[in-house]
Image (cartoon, rainbow, N blue to C red):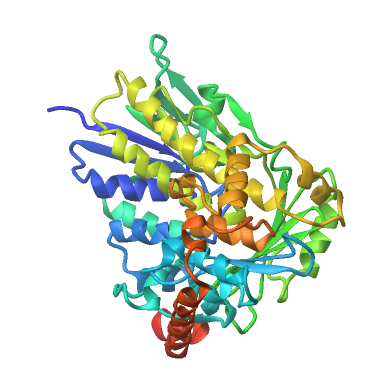
C-alpha cells in the first residue's frame, strides 16, 4: 500500500489552523494525505490580527462555515472599512470603505464625474457618495444586495473577531477533518544531506515527526524557512519605520462602530478594534522616537474604555523573506514576512498564501519543486510589494509638522512603483495598475483623496460633457444612499438580532 503524502505544519495560531483547515477541506482522503500540526501552549501566538478584509468571507464560505455560528463563537462584529484620524493632517478624518463611490452603473467614471462638477461649483465631498462610508458615519449596517440596481450592491464587508477564538474554531473544524494535532516544541530539524529538503522535526519530548512537505507557521521565529533553510530577509524598515507595538484589551463602549479605527500619533499610530465583548487596542510605534513606557502611556490615554489586560509588547521588522517557498517548505503568516496591520492585511496574507499554494502545488511529490516554488514566490512577492506600497502611501501623504516621524515621511524616497501610481493619479486621476492586487481603484482613491493628493484637471473625455448632464447622476446616487440609510439598522442592533454572542 502506498504511503500517504505527509504534510507537517509547524505552529498553530491563526496561520497554522487556517492552513490546516483549508488543506484538509481540499485533500480529504487521509489514506493519501496525512496532515499533522504541531504547536505548544507554552509558546502561544501573537494574536493581534483581529481586523479582517472582505476576502475572509470567501475563505469561510469555502470551508462551509456558518456565519452566525462563527460570529457568535468569536465575539465578532461587522466591518465596512477603516477610519483614519489625523493621518493627512491633525484634526482631519476619512474612511477607507469596502465599497464603491457612486452606483454600479457609473462607478468606473464616478470620480471623474464628481471632479468635473466639483471644478465648477461647490458640492459635497466624494465620501458623501459612498454608501459604505455613510453607513460607517452613522454606525449602521445592512447586508449587501445581489441586485446591481440597488445601492446596497456597492459594498462588501469583513469582520472584527477574537483571533484566538477564531483559531480555536478552525482547530475544531480541522480535527474533525482528520488533522492530527501534536502538542510539542520543535527543538531540532533534520535535512536530507543530498537535496537539502527537510525530512523531519524533532520535538523536546523526544518525538520525531517525519514528513514530505513542511509548512512553517512558527511566527516571527521562522524556524524552518529562516533558521533552517536560511532564506534571506528583505528589510523594508527604511520605508516603514515603526518597529514595535504595545497591545491591550479594554472595555467596549456601548456604541459598536462597523469599522476599525486608526489614529496617527507622534511616533506611529493607534488601532481600536470593536468586538462584542471588548475592544482590541494597540500602538504601533518607532522605538527610536519614544520609549516603551511612553508608548504604553500614550496608548492608555487613547483608550475608550477601562483596560482589561496588561500591556503586551511586540518587536518586529517590516519586510519579507525573499523566498517564502524554499526546498520542500513554505512559510505562511509571520514566518514569511511582516507588514504592520495598518490596513488589516495580516490575515489576508495568510489567506492568499494558502490559495496560491493550493493552486500551484498538488501535494503529490516533493521532487523537482523549483518550477512550482518559483511561481509561488513570484505571486507572493507581488502581493507583499503591492501592500507595502499602499501602506507607505499613508505615511508619505501627510502635512504634519508636529513630530520627527511625519516630517521625515513627507520627503522620504518611496519605491518607484508607488511614485508612479502617485504621479499618474495626480495627472490623470487613474492608473491601470489600480486594477491589480488586493487594493483596487476605490481604495487608492480613498487614501489619495483623504490625505490630500488630488487630480489636476479633469479627464478630457468627461470634461467635454456639460455639468448639467452629470449633476442628475450625482443627485440620483445621493437619493439612493438616503433611501438605503433609512432602511438600515444600527450596527449594535443588527448584531444583537443576528449573531449575539451572549445568546
The quarter of the image holding the N terminus is: top left
Depth check: 262 or 334 in front? 262
Q: Position of residue 104 (x, y in %)?
A: 37, 69
Q: Look at 40% across and 15% down and name the residue there.
A: 192
**Does residue 476 appear to the left or right of 402 in the view shown?**
left
Q: Quadrant of residue 62?
A: bottom left
Residue 215's place in the image compared with 133, above or below, is above
Image position of 434 (left or right of 341): left
Closer-to-camera residue (482/314): 482
Q: Outermost residue toward the top?
A: 194
The residue lying at 31 percent from left, 61 percent from top is 61
User: Can you give x and y, in whole percent of width and height, for residue 337 in the image?
Assistant: 56, 38
Split into 4 quadrants, where in the image is the C terminus?
bottom left
Percent coordinates x, y for residue 376 in the rendering: 39, 32
Residue in view at x 31 percent, y 63 percent: 65
Closer to the camera, 148 or 361?
148
Residue 160 visible here: no
Amino acid at each position: 500500500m502506498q504511503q500517504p503524502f505527509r504534510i507537517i505544519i509547524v505552529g498553530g495560531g491563526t496561520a497554522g489552523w487556517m492552513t490546516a483547515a483549508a488543506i484538509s477541506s481540499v485533500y480529504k482522503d487521509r489514506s493519501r494525505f496525512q496532515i499533522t500540526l504541531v504547536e505548544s501552549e507554552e509558546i502561544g501566538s501573537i494574536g493581534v490580527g483581529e481586523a479582517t478584509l472582505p476576502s475572509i468571507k470567501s475563505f469561510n464560505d469555502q470551508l462551509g462555515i456558518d456565519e452566525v455560528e462563527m460570529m457568535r463563537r468569536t465575539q465578532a462584529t461587522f466591518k465596512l472599512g477603516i477610519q483614519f484620524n489625523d493621518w493627512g493632517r491633525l484634526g482631519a478624518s476619512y474612511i477607507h470603505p469596502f465599497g464603491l463611490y457612486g452606483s454600479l452603473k457609473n462607478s468606473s467614471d464616478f470620480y471623474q464625474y464628481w471632479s468635473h462638477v466639483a471644478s465648477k461649483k461647490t458640492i459635497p465631498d466624494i465620501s458623501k457618495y459612498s454608501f459604505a462610508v455613510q453607513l460607517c458615519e452613522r454606525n449602521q449596517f445592512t447586508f449587501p444586495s445581489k441586485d446591481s440596481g440597488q445601492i446596497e450592491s456597492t459594498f462588501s464587508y469583513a469582520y472584527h473577531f477574537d483571533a484566538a477564538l477564531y483559531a480555536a474554531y478552525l482547530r475544531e473544524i480541522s480535527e474533525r477533518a482528520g488533522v492530527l494535532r501534536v502538542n510539542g516544541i520543535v527543538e531540532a530539524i533534520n535535512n536530507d544531506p543530498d537535496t537539502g529538503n527537510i525530512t523531519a522535526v524533532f520535538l523536546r519530548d523526544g518525538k520525531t515527526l517525519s514528513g514530505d512537505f513542511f509548512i512553517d507557521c512558527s511566527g516571527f521565529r521562522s524556524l524552518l524557512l529562516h533558521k533552517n533553510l536560511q532564506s534571506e530577509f528583505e528589510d523594508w524598515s527604511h520605508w516603514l519605520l515603526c518597529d514595535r507595538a504595545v497591545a491591550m484589551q479594554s472595555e467596549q463602549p456601548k456604541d459598536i462602530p462597523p469599522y476599525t479605527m486608526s489614529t496617527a500619533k507622534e511616533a506611529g499610530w493607534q488601532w481600536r478594534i470593536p468586538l462584542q465583548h471588548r475592544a482590541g487596542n494597540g500602538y504601533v510605534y518607532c522605538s527610536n522616537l519614544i520609549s516603551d513606557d511612553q508608548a504604553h502611556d500614550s496608548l492608555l490615554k487613547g483608550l475608550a474604555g477601562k483596560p482589561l489586560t496588561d500591556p503586551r509588547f511586540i518587536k518586529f521588522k517590516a519586510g519579507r523573506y525573499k523566498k517564502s517557498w524554499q526546498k520542500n517548505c513554505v512559510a505562511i503568516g509571520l514566518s514569511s514576512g511582516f507588514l504592520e496591520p495598518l490596513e488589516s492585511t495580516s490575515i489576508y496574507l495568510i489567506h492568499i498564501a494558502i490559495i496560491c499554494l493550493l493552486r500551484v502545488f498538488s501535494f503529490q511529490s516533493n521532487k523537482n519543486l523549483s518550477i512550482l516554488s518559483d511561481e509561488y514566490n513570484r505571486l507572493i512577492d507581488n502581493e507583499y510589494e503591492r501592500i507595502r506600497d499602499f501602506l507607505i502611501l499613508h505615511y508619505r501623504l501627510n502635512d504634519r509638522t508636529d513630530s520627527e516621524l511625519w516630517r521625515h515621511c513627507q520627503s522620504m524616497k518611496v519605491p518607484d512603483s508607488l511614485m508612479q501610481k502617485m504621479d499618474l493619479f495626480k495627472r490623470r486621476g487613474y492608473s491601470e495598475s489600480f486594477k491589480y492586487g488586493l487594493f483596487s481603484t476605490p481604495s487608492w482613491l480613498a487614501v489619495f483623496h483623504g490625505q490630500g493628493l488630488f487630480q489636476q484637471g479633469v479627464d478630457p473625455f468627461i470634461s467635454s460633457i456639460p455639468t448639467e448632464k452629470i449633476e442628475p447622476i450625482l443627485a440620483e446616487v445621493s437619493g439612493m444612499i438616503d433611501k438605503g440609510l433609512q432602511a438600515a439598522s444600527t450596527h449594535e442592533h443588527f448584531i444583537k438580532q443576528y449573531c449575539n454572542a451572549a445568546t
